[in-house]
Amino acid sequence: MVLNRPTDPAMYCFSCRIFLREEKFKNKTAWKTVDIDTWRSAIGKIKEHASTEAHMMSMVRWNIYSKKALQAAFDTLDIQGKATQEKERQRNREILTRLIDISLYLARQRQAFRGDVELSSSANQGNFIELVKTLAQYDSVMKLHLDAVQEKQASMKRPQVSLLSNRSQNDIIMSLGTFIRRKIQNEIKEAQIFSILLDETTDVSHKEQVSFVVRYVSDMEIKECFLQVCTLESTTGKELENVVISLLQDNGLDLKNIRGQGYDGAANMSGMYKGLQSRICAHDEKALYVHCQAHCLNLVLVESAKSSVHFVTFFSLVEKLYVFCTSSTKRHTAFLKCQQSLYPGQRVVELQKLSDTRWSCRERSLKALNKVLKALIKLLTDISESDPPDTAAGDATMYLRAIDVEFLLCLEITTTVFQVTGVASDALQQKDLDVSTAYTVTDGVLDTVKNLRSEEEFKTIFQKAIEKAEDAGMNIPTVPPGHGRKRKVPARYLHSATAAQDSRTFQTVEEFYRAKVYFMFLDTITEGLNRRFKVDGTMPTGKILQSFQSLTVHDNWVGTPNTEAVQAIKTL
């Protein structure tokens, strides 16, 4: 490169002047031609200089320097670019961490993520977006991100990546689910053996679904973890077997490692030949089936409520009274005022709906009804005698007539018995319950019910019902219901102790209700407890349960272990 300055009538070689410093080239290289009047004479000098050793050396140095300088510039840009990328990556991680925490919060609280209308102009964009906006008020990271997203959305027509869209929410949920599922799978594989729990239900779209829960031990702690819900095409034992095998394969679990099965008592689940439990046992006989003890107790109570027409009528009326008092704001307010006038200074009690599936919860419903029965009768009386007549006067009169001595007696009986079974049901649902305690609880219920089956206990209950009837001004019957006609005993009760009493002629109302209502109710519960909780020692599950029960009996280990305890150890 030749440089020429207007103030200096000389020309210089840039490369030689800058990159050539050797002493030997001092007078030859950084050449300087003075008093060059024309370019014609300069061209020859330039060509001559370009072929000199000094110039070629300077050009080499210039090229080397240029490459180094260019590489240094590129390196600087690369470092700056990587720093910018890392900064952006770190910022995105901070944003994503906050979004994950928001998702975990909504999941723990069982809250919906999406909103009905998620437009920016909407007053409520859904729980997820609203939590992001709330957090942005106190967190600079989320505030900057939310401002940037809103700015881009306002200035650009094409959608931008915001990590707040419904797709991003679904991706976060799926990622969290995958992470949790893998953690559970790893814990199960470390435990090696496990039990499976399945339950069927129908959703709002009338699709049959089954939930899949695995029970295992991790770090000496019993865990029950939900893994999946799947839709069923049918509910046969074969279909359920295919579903279980598919679920195990999807979660990387081996069917041979199942040691327990827990289902309800439906035939497709518990059937000995074509039920799910028998089909799983066909793969491995060590997969023992156990019916949920709390569910068994619930079924016993369901059967007891159908023990006679008296209790069927009673529970139907209890439900109708609840609907009558709570379906109208006017009647509900009047009911509360009746309580305040009859029980001044006491806390008002709300009637509770009878649970169709959890019969153990009916104890609280019956207890509440028993406590405010006087206020309920006053409400029905006020409505039936209202002037001008209330639109519900007809129903109130009908219910008022239905609340008689028989109703009060059934209320006293069920309140007394369900109080015992309610405590037992709560105990059977404890997480730390063991086999020994479960049988102790059920044996305690059975003993209590047997003790209640006496003339003395019934006399006490009957007297309470009579006193309440007299206090309410009811007529006390003097002749047993159905006097003069004989009812045929249902076949399912022919084996019970009450069957022998059906040929009797009852002289008093008390005798009739003791035999036909009270004893029949208790006998149904006793028979159900014996049938559902009695361990069959001939079956594999029964042998193991009997062995556990024997090992936990203190008397079997006093001094030298007895034969029963030794045999239990051998069985296990």
Image (spheres, rainbow, N blue to C red):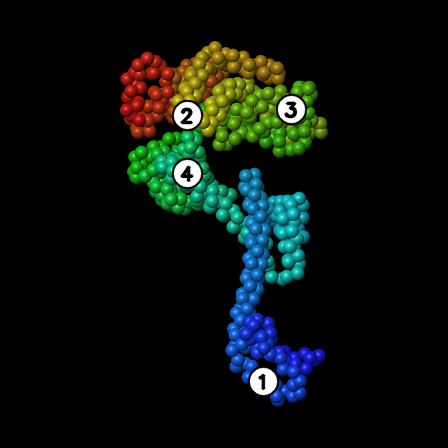
Q: Quadrant of residue 271?
A: top left
Nearest the eye: 103 or 374: 103
| Disc 3 to disc 4: CB gap under 8 Å | no
Residue of label 4 = 187
Q: Quadrant of the C terminus?
A: top left
Q: Residues within 10 Å of mark 2 (few under 14, many from 20)?
A: few
Element marked by disc 2: loop
Q: CA distance from mark 2 to mark 4?
A: 22 Å
- Counting residues from the start of the chain, the first of labels 2 and 3 encountered is 3
Type of amino acid at the residue the image marks with label 1: Lys
Instruction: Give the residue at mark 1.
Output: 45
Give the CA separation, mark 3 to mark 4.
49 Å
Q: Residue at x 61, y 27 (%)?
A: 350
Residue 434, label in figure = 2
| 529, 507: nearer the viewer | 529
Three-letter amino acid code at disc 4? Glu
Quick check: 43 left or right of 565?
right
Q: Are marks 2 and 4 in contact (CB under 8 Å)?
A: no
